[in-house]
Image (tube, rainbow, N blue to C red):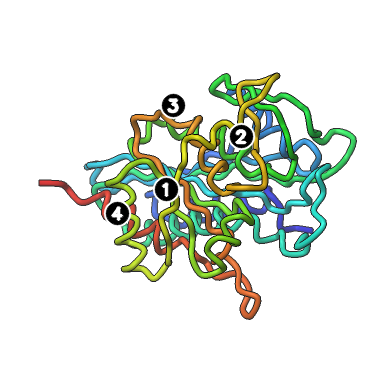
Amino acid sequence: NVLNSISMANTARKIAAESGGLIECTILGKVECEKRGMGSYLAVGRGSETEPQFIHLAYKPKDGKINKKVGIIGKGVLFDTGGYNIKTAMMGLMKFDCGGAAAVLGAALTISELALEGVEAHFIVAACENMVNEKAYVPSDVIVASNGMTIEVDNTDAEGRLTMADALVYADKEIGCEDIIELSTLTGACMVALGTGLAGVFTQNEDLASELRDISKVTGDKSWRMPLEQEYNDQLKSKIADIKNCGTRYGGAITAGLFLENFVDKKKPFAHIDIAGPVWSDATGATGFGSKLVTEWVRRKGEKKE
């Protein structure tokens, strides 16, 4: 299939090439990711014949005046078999597991065409495929993320959070983004809770929660704030690593959000947005959900606060 991580990287290059110099594109290959210690992300892509492509689009306004530096991460698993914890349902739809990446790249394109002022925006996608072969990661593996955290792989089908762990560290530490949001088709649990019409917003930051709630109403990208119950962190405790990559079947959307919090400075505004439900329509296909939300969020971040 030609729609893989390499073709997504080429799409990112095209967006940058057509941006009139407003967007710079950087693609990190396997070697560059290894140098940064991205063991969490690289573990997921080990089973694919296509090498992972770590995509970074950096948008800067023409006049160079910047009020805010923000990061937007999109889950970019181009196909998800579930790995050795292979999926027993919905595998045919797993081409939509890059819906977060699609929303983020779509927003980057729109923002460059609007030539937004006052904001520096970094769009990041850790693109890969979660496949099965003799090199693929397996349950019980212990992998190391780029912030040094060790992760016990409890389930290879909880792969998206592993790719985004290193993407979040990159946005936080290497780029120095001040505010970070992340969009992903992360859990079926969020679909069970909210159905297919709403995204789940997980954040500890009240101001960011309020911003996203208002933007959701303005753009029509419907969302609902979900809890981040700290007691559920007990589900992620591991006997052999710093953390497990998933908990029990109960509260799965919440524990996914709690897992991701380990890879961003706790002082920084950060939101995880689970778009698993609204990113796809059985009637029409891909919806583009999240692109308008990201675009408006970035636009508002460029406004100078009095």
Image spot of residue 259 (x, y percent): 55, 36
**Amino acid on which the number 4 mark rests in the picture:** Glu
Of the two numbered discs 2 and 4 in the rendering, the one whose residue sits closer to the viewer: 2
- Picture coordinates of residue 264 (x, y %)? 45, 32
Going 42% across and 48% down the picture, which residue do you hit?
23
The crowd level at tag 4 (other Cα within 10 Å; few <14, some 14-19, many 20+) is few
Residues at marks 2 and 4, CA–CA distance in whole angstroms: 30 Å
Q: Which mark is residue 235?
A: 2
Do we see residue 32 in this rendering?
Answer: no
Seen in the picture, residue 296 relative to 240 is either above or below; the reply is below
Q: Which mark is residue 91?
A: none
Residue at numbered disc 4? 211
- Badge 2 crowding class, 10 Å Cα cut-off, few under 14, some 14 to 19, many 20 or more, is some
Task: Please name the amino acid that badge 3 sits on.
Answer: Lys
Closer to the camera: disc 3 or disc 1?
3
Q: Tell me which residue sits at (45%, 61%) in the image.
A: 291
Between residues 195 and 10, which one lies in front from this camera angle?
A: 195
Mark positioned earlier in the residue sequence (4 or 1): 1
**Given contact means CB atoms under 8 Å apart, are the residues at marks 2 and 4 in contact?**
no
Task: Label 4: state its secondary structure.
Answer: helix
Report the disc number at residue 23: 1
Q: Amino acid at mark 1?
A: Ile
**Cα gap from disc 3 to disc 2, whole angstroms:** 27 Å
